[in-house]
Image (cartoon, grey):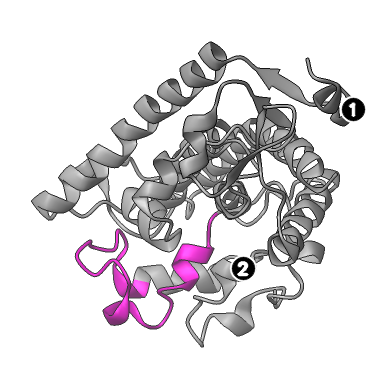
């Protein structure tokens, strides 16, 4: 290890190591990307994948591009210098360029948010009603208009009126219909995300993917891919608990309008929160390294 790398506390990867990591990542993500492209060519709608590839509007090329993350130096990596994100130091090792002021501000926000969520207890009493509140009183204008509502428009509205609406996530709350917003126990705001977001929320789990991508290239590409797979699982639960009937594409409903369904949803929340915990911890550690 070079003296510069040792002084920085860096991990140094030999050429064979980093090339193997890059190849494995590209092969892994290629499957996700090609499946998406094939579905788009066929004109197939999918409420899980459509969300992950459009709500999180990162280019397909950004999803496949490899980065080792901050705190890693690469040996014999001159070929990477065609990518402006990398530079080679006097010791001959190739590293990521440090974040500029704008990027560092973005990284600091992500770190503060992730730390706050990690320290907060999970709230498990929302039962996925955010998707129902996005339809309340406006069924004819629903986002997934090609899919039927399991209980119809009146039945959907009745569930929203009968159950407490307790959404803590701003990016879900902002899509509530005007009639549904006053029914929520909170009024989450963009500026209040650090105070409100909590680990039991399926959208907070999905957003780990957003924060890993926004932190590229200073967070490893492998972590971003792990966060994507976690987000896919969380979005699947989100859609199963929604008011829509997606059973035709294999999404068995979680009937949150029943005691059994609410119990199932809470079980899924606990499972997803547990899966998210190590991903969030890794993200915090990598963000800390990127800002060191």
For the point 22% across and 61% down, the residue is 147
Badge 2 crowding class, 10 Å Cα cut-off, few under 14, some 14 to 19, many 20 or more, is many
| Main SS, magenta residues | loop
For the point 39% across and 30% down, the residue is 26
Disc assigned to residue 57: none
Is residue 132 inside the magenta stretch?
Answer: yes
The answer to whether residue 206 shows anywhere in this view is yes
Is residue 266 inside the magenta stretch?
Answer: no
Q: Position of residue 185 (x, y in %)?
A: 71, 73
Q: Which residue is mark 1?
A: 7
For the point 86% across and 45% down, the residue is 119
Quarter holding the N terminus is top right
Helix, strand or loop for disc 2: loop
Q: Residue furthest left?
A: 42
Q: Position of residue 14 (x, y in %)?
A: 61, 14
Pointers 2 and 1 in contact (CB under 8 A)? no
Helix, strand or loop for disc 1: helix
Q: Position of residue 231 (x, y in %)?
A: 50, 43
- Magenta residues? 128-154
Image position of 284 with respect to 44: above or below: above
Q: Which residue is mark 2?
A: 165
Q: Position of residue 44 (x, y in %)?
A: 15, 52
């Amino acid at each position: 290890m070079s003296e510069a790398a040792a002084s920085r506390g860096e991990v140094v990867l030999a050429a064979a190591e980093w090339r193997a990591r890059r190849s494995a990542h590209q092969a892994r993500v290629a499957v996700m990307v090609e499946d998406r492209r094939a579905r788009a060519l066929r004109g197939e709608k999918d409420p899980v994948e459509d969300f992950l590839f459009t709500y999180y509007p990162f280019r397909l090329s950004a999803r496949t591009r490899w980065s080792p993350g901050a705190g890693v130096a690469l040996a014999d990596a001159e070929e990477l210098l065609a990518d402006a994100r990398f530079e080679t130091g006097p010791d001959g090792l190739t590293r990521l360029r440090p974040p500029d002021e704008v990027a560092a501000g973005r990284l600091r926000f992500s770190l503060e948010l992730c730390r706050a969520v990690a320290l907060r207890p999970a709230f498990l009493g929302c039962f996925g009603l955010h998707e129902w509140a996005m339809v309340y009183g406006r069924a004819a204008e629903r986002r997934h208009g090609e899919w039927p509502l399991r209980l119809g428009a009146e039945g959907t509205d009745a569930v929203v009126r009968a159950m407490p609406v307790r959404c803590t996530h701003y990016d879900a709350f902002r899509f509530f219909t005007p009639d549904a917003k006053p029914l929520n126990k909170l009024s989450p705001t963009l500026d209040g995300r650090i105070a409100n977001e909590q680990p039991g929320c399926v959208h907070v789990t999905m957003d780990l993917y957003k924060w890993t991508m926004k932190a590229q290239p200073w967070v490893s590409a492998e972590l971003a891919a792990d966060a994507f797979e976690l987000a896919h699982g969380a979005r699947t639960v989100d859609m199963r608990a929604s008011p829509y009937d997606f059973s035709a594409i294999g999404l068995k409903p979680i009937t949150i309008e029943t005691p059994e369904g609410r119990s199932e949803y809470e079980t899924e929340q606990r499972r997803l929160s547990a899966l998210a915990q190590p991903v969030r911890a890794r993200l915090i550690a990598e963000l800390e390294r990127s800002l060191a």
